[in-house]
Each structure stands twice: as structure tokens, then as C-alpha cells.
Amino acid sequence: MDEPTLVVEDLVTWYLTERGPIHAVDGVSLAVQRGETLALVGESGCGKSATALSIMRLIPSPPGLIMSGRVLLEGRNLLELPEPDMCKVRGGDVSMIFQEPMTSLNPVYTVGFQVAEAILVHHKVSEREADKRAVELLDRVGIASPARRAKDFPHQMSGGMRQRVMIAMALAANPKVLIADEPTTALDVTIQSQILDLIRQLQQELNMGVLLITHDFGIVAEVADRVAVMYAGQIVEEGSTGALLECPTHPYTRGLISSVPKMDDPTGTMLYSIEGASPNLLDPPTGCRFAPRCGEARPECRECRPELESTGDGRRVRCPGGGGRI
Amino acid sequence: MREIAGRLWRHPRGRVGIMITAAVIIIAIAAPWIAPYDPYDIGQRGPRRLPPGPGHPLGTDAQGKDILSKLIYGARVSLIVGITTGVCVTVLGALLGILAGYLGGLADTLIMRICDILFVVPGLPLMILLANYMGTKFYMIIVIFTMLGWAGVARMIRSQVLSLKSRDFVLASRSVGARPGHIMREHILVSVSPLLIVNGVLSAAGVMVAEAGLSFLGFGDPTAVSWGKMLYEAQSGHALLFGAWWWVIPPGLAIFITVFGFMMFGYALEEVLNPHIPRQSAYSKLRKGMARYAGIGKQAGIGRPGGGESVG
């Protein structure tokens, strides 16, 4: 196996509030290789987006603060780069697309201008040349008659088209890693699969690593090579998509997968849902963070802090019960 | 740009504003050719306190100077002081407001504390004091007004920037590697520019009144011919005691009309540039309603939701 392009080691990000620090990201480690898609899955507020923004060093500060850890892009620690160098990395080596294509484009500029802007930030080319390349990029992300649509303003485009424009902007400098933060959540289902297909196709063409943040196991099954499940700021389980979906080890992962509605569920049955709510990250539980909601928790689960342990086959799990007790 | 100008012209108050403003500017520029006498010429003397009549359409003052000529030349001082200060206040306020809002931290604290100080400084006494010590050349008035005026603009712009910088498109721009300078210029400044333009026009109007006020109190440039100074001379020359109404009314009216024109221009501009402000007179509402009722709305291009009013 090659050396991974993007490696995150023990990333810790806090939100400093008046009531104390919120441990939004608490020791996350992950790795993405070129051409590979890693899905980061978890419920709202578990720290998925905070992880992504920390990697890009776009976490709003204050109140956000990256406390420790390393983000290595081909061996270079992004967290130690001076800000001007980081600007070159953003959009250059690592790009990010966001959940809300409706508001992520500036309403006062044409989309062509905004794609050209992303090109001009990273390449010393004339504006005319940048406009030309912008049209090529719009063509590449599947926008019909790109030369004409480049002159459109964002409000003249549908959500799916705008997300394509966002992707074009993200690809302006051929990044090595693309972070997609819920790229299809705001889109309807047919557009969703088109956008996912597009990301997958561009990933193969450009040999990019993709970190896909989502809460939708349907998307995970469709596009991810590997999955990392996050709960309360920590990764609780990681493994290849097939293995993890077929036999989830961690009780939380099992709960998540059980709560996805299935076509062959008998009519009239209640959809499964995990009891309780995610813990307050101002004061997380001392032991396993999932223990208060876990149906299989034993007394020691509430005391010892479990580590993310390898269980072979490239799988890791953070469960004091050792997982596997099915 | 042409579209905005067109909509401004169709706006009733906008048209009045444009016409008054344009007329005053033309008069100011063409003053040497249209004024019957040169008010800066000390030798020009006519009969004193002459009522309006042939030769002196608006009569003369206590020194026998032609009032119409003074009025025409006075437009120059008002406009130069008003427009220059409007521009300076806007530029300085925008620069510091954007820096404070976008950078935050120490820069924000520093700039906003200076604003706080400027807000509690009593404006008029300070202006009088400064005008006395720093000389009464009229460019000093511009400097003083700019120094005192930028704080309001900066604070207003800062609050806008605070909301703008958390917008998704700013985050998206940062995520493709745009630098702070680029974002402030291309995204923030462009977004607040309608506000700046409107505010610049309105503060120009305000400064013209303030300049007239200072001159009226006798702190204006003694060598310049301005409307405020004409009022000052009329007052100190006991114009009303002599019944010389032609000496008092024209400069007062000139100040009023010019400021009124700028205000109309500014408010109309605000409504044209900011589509969130409903811009409908009772008349146009009635017309729209009737057009829709009669089914001719589509044909006339009115009565459709948002028809012809979106910013593009």
C-alpha cells in the first residue's frame, strides 16, 4: 500500500464557551489514500464537520481552537504552516465542498467569475485564460452549454447545478484530497446520485482522495471504500465498507445501521432508534461515551476509557466490551 | 450600471433628486460665465441694500455686492465641502469598518475604541475650537468633518461585515484559498458598496448643512463666498432690521433646496440599490393593483411578483 496522502493524528479541537470547553473533536485519527473514499459517518453534532474544518484550518476562531494533533499532507504538517502557505494548500492540495450550494456562491457574481476566481488564486494566468479554463471546468462537471451558463448568476441555477459549480471551484487546482461535507444533503434524491456519480468519476480521473462526510448509510454503501463512524467527538469504529456494514462490531454502529429503514421491513413495525441523546460535550461521560445509551454496557464500561483497538483486517473499534459480543 | 441609473430616473424622488443635484453642479461649474458679477472682486461695488431690480436681479447687500452672483459662487463651496467630505468619510469609514469587522481581535478593539471616543466628543464645540486653531481655510473644514464623521460609517459597516463574514460564500471562498485581502475587496466591499454609496450621498447633504452652520456662526473661511457666510453677513449686517429680505431668503433657500435634492437622491438610491426596502407609493400600488385586476399587468410589465425589480 502507498503512503496515505492525508493523515490526521490525534486531532483535538475545542470550542471555548463561557461554560467551559466543548470537546468537539477529541483525538480523531484517520488516513485517506489517493483514489480512495473514506466516509465519516455520525449523527448531528458528533464532530464530523468540526473535523473537516479543522483539517482545512477553517474552524471559526474564536470560539474554535485546534488544541493538538497533526494533519499531515504528504508528510507536511498543515497545522504548523504559516497562514499564507495554508492559503496555497486550501483549494490547491486540499479542497472542500459544502452542504449548502444555495448559499455557498456569492449572489452578486456570475458563476463563471467565481470559478475563474478560484483559478486565479492558484495560477498566474490572465483573466481571459482563467475565464476559458472556468468554462472547461464547468463542462467537466457536467454543466450543459457551459460557455452560456458561465454568465449566469447563482439564482438562475438549480441546487444541483450550483453544487456542480462548487465542485468546479474545488477542482480548479487539481487537489489531491477533496473533503465533501454532506455534499448532497440539501439536494433531492435523483440529483443526489448524479452528484455522487460526478464526484466518483472525477475522483478516478484525478486520482483524488475523498473524505466524504455524511449521515446517510445509503450514500456510504454506494460510494465509500472505507467507513469511520464518529460518536461524541471520537471515532468509535473503522473498517472497509462491506465488512463494516455487514457485521458492525460497535453497539453504536449496529444501532445506526438498524435505524436505517429497509424496503423489506414488515408494514406496521416501528423504525428502530437508539435510546437517549448524544452526551453533552461540555462534560462527556468518564468511561465509554456511548455507555449511557448502550444496551450492552457493563459496569466497567462506565469507568475505563476505551481505546481504538485494531481487530485485524484493517478494522478498528473502540469498545470496552471488546466489541464482537453479538 | 445603466439599469440602476434608469431605475433611479423612473423613481419619482430619484428624478427630483437627480435634477436638483445636476442643476446645482452645473451652476457651480459654470459660475464664472453665468454670474453677472465676480463676488471675489473687491472693486465690485453697487448701491447698498438695493432691492431686486434690473441690473441686480436679487438686489445687493450692505457692501453693495450683487447677491445673485454670491449665490451662484456659493454653490461651489457648498458642493466642494459636501462632496469631498462625503467621499473622504465614506472611504475612511469603509476601510476601517471592514478591517475592524473582518480581522476582529486587536484591530477591531482599537478601531472601535477610537470610534467610541469620537462618538462622545461633543461635535459642534470641537469643530468651532478646531476651526479657530487650525485656521479657517475651507479645506480645514473638510479635514475636521472627515475626522469626526468616519466613526459612524465605520461602525455601521463593521456590523454589516460581521454578518457577511459568516456567510457560506465567504467560507467557500476561503476554502479555495482566497486570502483575507482578496475576500475583503471582492466579497465584503462589493456587498457593502450600496450602503456606502447611499451613506456617502446622505452624509454629503449633512455636511453641507453643518458647513453652512459653521459659516453662519462666523467660523467659516473668511475669504470664501458661501451660503452660510451670506447668512452670517446678513445677520451681522441687520438685514431684517432694514427689511432686506432679499439678502436672507436666497441663501437659506439655496441651502434648503440643495440639501433636499441630495437627500431625495440618496433615499431614492437606497431604495433602488436595496431591493428589500419596499418602494411603492400609494399611487403605484393602486396602479399595480388595477393593472392586475384588468389583466394587462403582464403586457405592461408590472403587477408580476418582482417584475422588473430584481437586481441583476
Image (spheres, coloured by chain):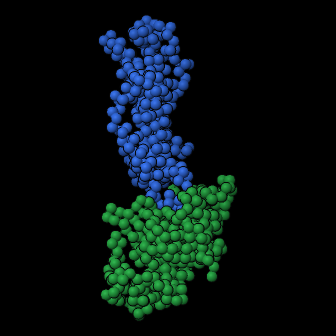
Chain colours: A green, B blue
User: Total marks drawn?
Assistant: 0
B197 or B118, which is in the foreground?
B118
Residue B20, horizontal then vertical, whole percent: 46, 31
Asked if one can make out residue A103 in the rendered structure from this viewpoint, the answer is no
Which quarter of the rendering shows the N terminus of chain B? top right
Give the left or right position of residue A87, taking residue A251 as reference. Answer: right
Residue B292, horizontal then vertical, whole percent: 42, 53
Give the left or right position of residue B298, taking residue B234 as reference. Answer: right
Residue A291, horizontal then vertical, whole percent: 34, 83
Asked if one can make out residue B163 in the rendered structure from this viewpoint, the answer is yes
Q: Residue at x 55, y 55 (%)?
A: B179
Q: Residue at x 49, y 46 (%)?
A: B193
Give the residue furthest to the bottom. A326
Q: Residue at x 52, y 73 (%)?
A: A8
A251 or B73, which is in the foreground?
A251
* Vertical side of A172 occupied by A218: above or below: below
* Vertical side of B79 occupied by A90: above or below: below
Residue A57, horizontal then vertical, whole percent: 50, 64
Q: Residue at x 46, y 88 (%)?
A: A248
